[in-house]
Image (cartoon, rainbow, N blue to C red):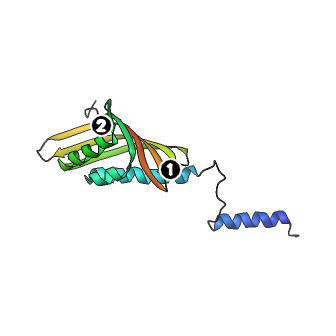
Amino acid sequence: MAITREFICVMIIALMGATGCAPEPEEGEFDAALIEGAVEDAVWAFHAADTQMNAEAVISLMWPEFSMLADGTRVTYDDAVAGSRSFMASLELFHTQWTDLQINVLDDKHAISTFLFRDSIRTKSGDLIQAQGPNSFVWEKREGEWRVLYADADHYPVGQ
């Protein structure tokens, strides 16, 4: 069997792929599965911050240009920062289930995550707050870090 130039090229490409040294995607191309995994990690970091009632961790996952539409009310970054701190400080327990997570990769720096939530929250004063609904996050990557740029959430009574 004669070793041809094409055979050598195929073997080099195969070895590069097997050793993790595959060529970088061309400009304008991106690895959607890799981005999806990174955004999913960020989503679950946000979930952990909520359930740990850690306002600073929640804030650290939002870009300063963050805005939100919550139950039809526009919320700015400053509103979200102040609201997160006061809300988390008022809680005894924050239990939330996030289901039906879907991540849509838009490009190498943007993705949208959507999920359904079901919250059961107990305040320090003993009130029980239960709600469910849809949530969307628009994620943006800057300098290797994924944070939320925009969010939308609608809260409905549990059972409706």
Q: Quadrant of the N terminus?
A: bottom right
Residue, x 42% and y 49% (percent of image)? 147
Residue, x 35% and y 45% (percent of image)? 98
Image position, residue 107 (x, y; %): 56, 45
> Could one spot residue 47 in this view of the protein?
no
Instruction: Judge whether 16 appears above or below 88 on screen.
Output: below
Mark 1, secondary structure of its residue: helix
Q: Quadrant of the C terminus?
A: top left
Residue corresponding to mark 1: 36
The amino acid type of the residue labelled 2 equals: Gln
> Would residue 61 appear left or right of 37 to someone viewing this image?
left
The amino acid type of the residue labelled 1 equals: Glu
Instruction: Judge whether 37 appears above or below 158 on screen.
Output: below
Q: Outermost residue, right direction?
A: 2
**Between discs 2 and 1, the one toward the N terminus:** 1
Mark 2, secondary structure of its residue: strand
Image position, residue 51 (x, y; %): 27, 51
Which mark, residue 132? Answer: 2
Image position, residue 128 (x, y; %): 17, 41
